[in-house]
Image: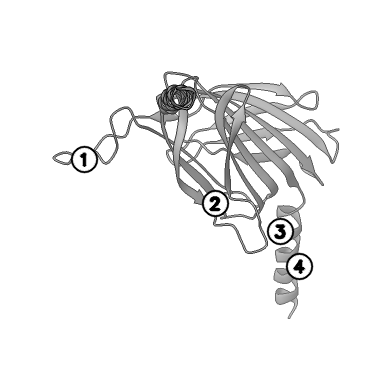
Amino acid sequence: MKLRCLLFTAAVSVGICANAAEISTYDTRMDVGPDGAAQASVTLRVTDNQSRRLVVPLGFASVEGLQLQSAPPGTQLKLRPSKEQAAVEVELPEDAAAEFQLQFAFRVPSLLFEPKPEEGQKSKFAAGTRLLRHGLVNTQATRIGTYQATVRLPEGTMVQSVREQLPKPSRKEFLPRVELDRIDGHQGALLQVKGLKQGDRTSMELEVVGDRHSYGWLLVGIVLSLAYLIGFRDSVRRRIA
């Protein structure tokens, strides 16, 4: 009986410790360059923290040049590489507050890439098409209240289609999982989801092409306008005659 009580108490204690901290907001910003590499920055708002150590999962397998930008004085970061998904170990000072903001940056090589067909098969995409994939798995017990990932595409490119946006919005959600918008004069996309528990996953895949199509529509509009003016002029001349 005593053993059962001890096991129950230990299990409850572990559960409390595992859920002691929460990442209330997790914002990732990705500025993609013409070469497909991206400069990424992460901003976290941590609440109810009672530990000096926090592990933050990243939505990327390959990360370079980790830099701390804003944190409680004395905070140290360490990159934890992985073939599946890298993570950042955060060591906090002893006097760290229960609620604080953390910001760090890094480089992601080949975030935007050209899909290669399997050997002996033809490509499913038109020439010049590139893909952008981003996904985050919450591998830690720390709950993520709201996750948001913003992508700013290189100049001269646009999203042709959203090939994946997970998890699918529930009936109570009125907005799509991925929204397309202009970001600092460039086309971009926004992925957002709430309530990521341990093991939950969110992701998006974008099909990106050159924005030459917009100039095509502009030329079509000009041609149609000229045709209308010429037709209108000839009609007026016939009426006068």
Q: Which residue is mark 2?
A: 201
Are the residues tagged 4 and 1 within 8 Å (C-beta)? no
- Other residues around mark 3 within 10 Å, as few (<14) / some (14–19) / many (≥20): few
Residue type, label 4: Thr
Residue type, label 1: Glu
Q: Quadrant of the C terminus?
A: top left
Residue type, label 3: Val
| Disc on the earlier residue, 1 or 3 | 3
| Disc on the earlier residue, 2 or 3 | 3
- Other residues around mark 4 within 10 Å, as few (<14) / some (14–19) / many (≥20): few
- Residue 57 placement: quadrant: top right
- Other residues around mark 1 within 10 Å, as few (<14) / some (14–19) / many (≥20): few
CA distance for labels 1 and 3? 47 Å
Residue type, label 2: Arg
Q: Which residue is mark 3?
A: 14
Q: Which residue is mark 4?
A: 9
CA distance for labels 2 and 4? 31 Å
Q: Which residue is mark 1?
A: 118
| Disc on the earlier residue, 3 or 4 | 4
15 horizontally vs 152: left or right: right
| Disc on the earlier residue, 2 or 4 | 4
Between 159 and 85, the one lying in front of the other is 159
Between 95 and 206, the one lying in front of the other is 206
Residue 206 lies, in percent from the top left, at 45, 39
Q: Quadrant of the N terminus?
A: bottom right
| Disc on the earlier residue, 4 or 1 | 4
Residue 127 lies, in percent from the top left, at 28, 29
For discs 4 and 1, the disc positioned in front in the rendered view:
1
The residue sitting at the bottom extreme is 1
Residue 210 lies, in percent from the top left, at 40, 25
